[in-house]
Amino acid sequence: MERLDKLLASTGRWSRREAKQLIKEGRVLVDGSPARSGEDKADPDGAAILVDGAPLALRRHTYVMLHKPAGVLSATEDPRQETVLDLLPPELRRLGLFPVGRLDKDTEGLLLLTDDGELAHRLLSPKNHVDKVYRARLDRPLGPADQAAFAQGITLADGLRCMPAELELIGDGTEVLVTLHEGKFHQIKRMTASRGAAVCWLKRLSMGPLQLDPVLKKGEYRLLTHEEVAKIGGKL
Ligand code: URA
């Protein structure tokens, strides 16, 4: 059983305060009877909740796919800089969403935001080896010897060992696709640097079974489809 004001607010349509007001105005019915206070409890899986006569569509968690543009921080708030949460509308911002892992400020591409801590933990845990695919543009080409080094597992300048990764060369090798099975800080930039090439542009294309939707322009977002949520093991 959960508090009714919390359940209403979890849809993102109302704040907690607005939900309390709706309840006070007698506009919320639980199993046919008007609710009286936000503190009333209801079973999110079993109760029939109507607001102004319309059934309440409850979701347990929210999953948002964002096409992160460069120049925006992968954080929930920052006193000075724009964050990925600032790109979402108020009804999504108040759900307590957070980015699942970080992209560097100058990296763009797929970022998942959710309020599902369990799923985030699962996707980020190094044990689970969730593949992440990046496209990078470099200041000088990489070649077959670099592919072999990536496949072996790169050792970074500070001695840190990376797991084997796939490097695919595009054209003359100044553009590459890299598939990582882990997520270390600045990993792509440090791996290419260890082979003498600097990243000029970096974009994440996918994370596990989740691919960046090509219809999303930079800065745009959408909710994951039911199918995508099922694929990543989320709970709607
Ligand atoms: N590797 C990087 O270097 N930066 C990112 O943002 C992601 C992977």
Image (spheres, grey):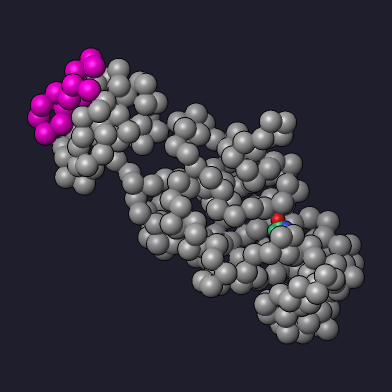
Q: Is residue 66 above or below residue 78?
A: below
User: In the image, what residue occupies the spot 45% across and 58% down?
Assistant: 119
Tell whether position 200 is magenta: no
Picture quadrant where residue 83 is located: top right
Quadrant housing the N terminus: top left
Left or right placement of residue 219 versus residue 176 in this view: left
- The x, y position of residue 103, in whole percent, is 67, 53
- Compare residues 16 and 195 and report the one nearer the observer: 16
Ligand 1 rendered quadrant: bottom right
User: In the image, what residue occupies the spot 42% across and 45% down?
Assistant: 62
Count of marks placed on residues: 0
Residue 212 visible here: yes
- The x, y position of residue 148, in whole percent, is 77, 84
- Compare residues 169 and 120 and report the one nearer the observer: 120
Residue 166 visible here: no
Q: Which residues are magenta?
A: 24-37
Tell whether position 26 is magenta: yes
Picture quadrant where residue 124 is located: bottom right
Left or right placement of residue 168 versus residue 33 in this view: right
Left or right placement of residue 204 versus residue 88 in this view: right
User: In the image, what residue occupies the spot 21% across and 29% down?
Assistant: 40
- The x, y position of residue 175, in whole percent, is 79, 66
User: In the image, what residue occupies the spot 21% across and 46% down?
Assistant: 45
- Compare residues 101 and 13 and report the one nearer the observer: 101
Left or right placement of residue 108 versus residue 50 in this view: right
- Compare residues 114 and 198 and report the one nearer the observer: 114
- The x, y position of residue 225, in whole percent, is 41, 52
